[in-house]
Each structure stands twice: as C-alpha cells, then as structure tokens.
Amino acid sequence: MVPVEILGVRQQQRDQEIVVLLLDSAADLAVPIVIGAREASAIAMAQAGLATPRPMTHDLLRDVLGAVGVTLDRVEIVALEGGIYFAELVLSNGVHLDSRASDAIALAVRTGSPVLCSAEIVALAGVEIVDVDQQAEVERFRDFLDHVSPEDFLGPGSPGGGPGPSPGGGRDD
C-alpha cells in the first residue's frame, strides 16, 4: 500500500465522466476513479470545508463512528476488478469494512484519515501527471511550429532574407 493524496474531483473533457484523482507523489502518477455526481459533490464540499444545514450521509457515518467510540484509521483502495475500485474502511478497533471507493474517500476527507492505494493499482491504472506550466509551453511550441515558415529563420542580408527572428524570440541562454 502506498499513501495517496486526494487531488480533487474533475470532469473529464473527452467523455464528461466525473473522476476523483488520487496522487501517488512518489511515482508522479494519478489514479482516476470514475464516481457519480452525488459522491463528487460530497467529496468536493468536504474538501472546500462547506457544511450543510443537515448532515449528509458521510457526515452521519462519521458521527455514528464517533458516537460508538470508533475512528476511521485509514482508507485502503484494495482492488480493481472490471473497472470497479474496491475499498476498505480500516477502523481503530481493527475492523475492516468493505466500501465503495467513492464513499470511503468522502469519509476520509471528513475525518482527515489517510488514503492508501495498492501499489499494483497505481502501476496499472495510474496516469502520468503533466505539469500545467510544461503543458502550456508545449502548446505554445506546437502553435509556433504550425505557423512558422523557413523565411522566419533567414536573417537580414541573407539570400531571400527577411527581417530575421522577431525580437525577444528564440533565446539560447
């Protein structure tokens, strides 16, 4: 099991699915878990520190655990079968409870409990994290390549030369 950070809830652009992203920072991989809109809302609200006038299901479960003197020790994402993630709630009394991953994550956010994920799942389902700044730079370079012409590289006085590179462009320091 490896510790993962709950990056948050995102909607994938290509197919509009809602995912919660779990980051394994040691491997620079994120595990996307497809979840429903209600679970996404529960996770996002808890991460934002928003409270509802009445307890939501995950708030109620947290309160029940506290009322019976048990705490959530950790959440473990233990299996991936047929595209479905399986999780376990590990309680302070040693009991392991089967759970949907989305419910377990929503409860972990509310209790401040750590989330661990099987290393095999991270290796199998993890996707490489792309630095947003790096991705923007790649997009700018692609745009440059789409619009550049050979004449742009000819300096003044060159045969067929144009004005040369634009000021501030192409630094090599």
Image: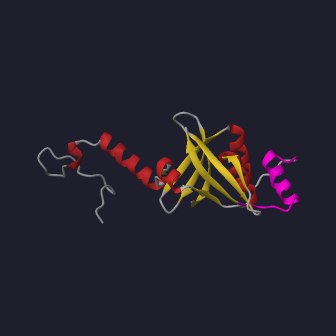
User: Which image quadrant: the N terminus?
Assistant: bottom right
Residue located at (35% from left, 44% from top): 142
Residue 160 horizontal side relative to residue 60, left or right: left
Residue 162 horizontal side relative to residue 13, left or right: left
Residue located at (30% from left, 66% from top): 173
Q: Position of residue 25 (x, y in %)?
A: 52, 61
Q: Position of residue 89 (x, y in %)?
A: 71, 54
Does residue 15 appear anywhere in the picture?
yes
Residue 92 horizontal side relative to residue 162, left or right: right
Residue located at (54% from left, 37% from top): 13
Q: Position of residue 52 (x, y in %)?
A: 83, 48
Does residue 48 appear anywhere in the picture?
no
Question: Residue placed farthest to the top in the image?
Answer: 15
| Quarter holding residue 23 | bottom right
Q: Position of residue 143 (x, y in %)?
A: 36, 43
Q: Nearer the viewer, residue 18 or 119?
A: 119
Position of residue 118 relative to residue 173, above or below, is above
Residue 1 horizontal side relative to residue 123, left or right: right
Q: Nearer the viewer, residue 54 or 79?
A: 79
- Look at the image and say whether residue 50 sits in the magenta stretch: no
The magenta segment is: 54-73
Residue located at (59% from left, 44% from top): 33
